[in-house]
Image (tube, helix red, strand yellow):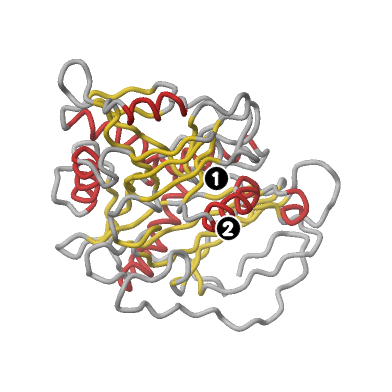
Amino acid sequence: MTVAPGLDAPIQLPLAGAVPVPSDAPAFGEAFTSHMVTAAWSDTSGWDEPELGPRRPLVIDPAAAALHYGQAIIEGLKAHRRPDGTLVVFRPDAHARRLAASARRLAIPELPGTLFLRAVEHLVAADGPTLPARPGFSLYLRPMIFATEPCLALRPSRHHLFALVAFITGGFFGRRPEAIAVTASDEYVRAAPGGTGAVKCAGNYAPTYRAQVAAAADGYEQVLWLDAIDGAHVEELGGMNVFVVSGGKSGKSVVRTPPLSGTLLPGVTRASLLELAADHGFRTEEEPLTVSEWHAGCRDGLLTEAFACGTAAGVTPIGRVRARGLEWTVGDGGPGPVTRTLRRALEDLRRGELPDRRAWLHEVRPTRQNALRSAK
């Protein structure tokens, strides 16, 4: 196991074996596979060569900076099994770039893109064969980098650890395409201008839990996050980007999403759907969306669909919204035709049923020839 320089030697701990995958879709984030990839960084030697080994508990000092000051970032991407049995990872290069952008924001050393891709390839090669061949399943990959130096000075850590683990999932909301109900938080905001809303840092997530628990108690699946200035503009939904659909003056459907203002995460699925929507003849717009405009558009029949998207959730229809004292149904309350078209296009592309014209799919061959140096 890789341990950052300056930490005590690892104690012997039992291995954390793979969780058996049930016949139906497992709960999101619970059915972990049996391997992991790690690489350490120090300010004197840079990044070590990554190592593939069994997934096991990490040994870090209780004074590790990540535990106290939150100097930690994450990513999330997926590998899919196509009908011919091949394994492909969706847009790993884009996820490598976003991890690097998150690292820059939190003064963490950037992981080279080649190292990121190599780590992904070898974990998928090792654990991809355990992915069920049934439709709807995928291998979710969770890369992370966090500060391991045992120092509580208020400065960037001089030691970091990169780790990559994976779990098998059927999707964040399961395999059902039914529309979800969402509610805006009147008490909390997710991100403010100049903050970390545009990066995937670990500290962005726990502060949203209280609002999510309250939403669930009221019968809503997700929290709709509004802007921090006046609480009028739609930003994100949970950890996902938001889209609405209108008819458009030209007769073509218009697929619209809030612009990347610095407080929204630049979703890889978001960017992909904007391109896929154009492929299908839809007009795309990146324009601000207010709560009042969304409500009035649905009331007047101008905004007929809405959906959220992300790596974990894919394309998830939004059927009912509550925000700023208003509550309304989107369209007929179910997934609309544009939402279904884009959801199917994304799934078909990943499964190899649409041509990969943009080279978004990175094939991984599960062979011993790809094996990394194994951790001792």
Distance from label 1 to label 2 (Cα)? 10 Å
Asked which quadrant contains residue 93, the reply is top left
| Quarter of the image with the N terminus in it | bottom right
Point 60% across, 45% down: residue: 201
The earlier-in-sequence mark between 1 and 2 is 2
On the picture, is 346 further left or further right than 99? left
| Quarter of the image with the C terminus in it | bottom right
Residue 309, relative to residue 118: is it above or below?
above
Label 1: how many residues lie within 10 Å, few (<14), some (14-19) or many (20+)?
Answer: some
Point 33% across, 48% down: residue: 316
Q: Amino acid at mark 1?
A: Leu
Can you name the residue that lies furthest to the right here? 153
Can you name the residue that lies furthest to the top here? 249
Tag 2, which secondary structure? strand
On the picture, is 283 further left or further right than 373? left
Circle 1/circle 2 CB separation < 8 Å: yes
Point 38% across, 71% down: residue: 26
Which residue is nearer to you in this view: 96 or 208?
Answer: 208
Whole-percent x, y for residue 165 in the image: 49, 63
Whole-percent x, y for residue 19 in the image: 45, 78
Label 2: how many residues lie within 10 Å, few (<14), some (14-19) or many (20+)?
Answer: many
Pointer 2 residue:
39
Which residue is nearer to you in this view: 357 or 204?
Answer: 204
Asked which quadrant contains residue 178, the reply is bottom left
Residue 330, relative to residue 67: is it above or below?
above
Which residue is nearer to you in this view: 175 or 324?
Answer: 324
Pointer 1 residue:
111
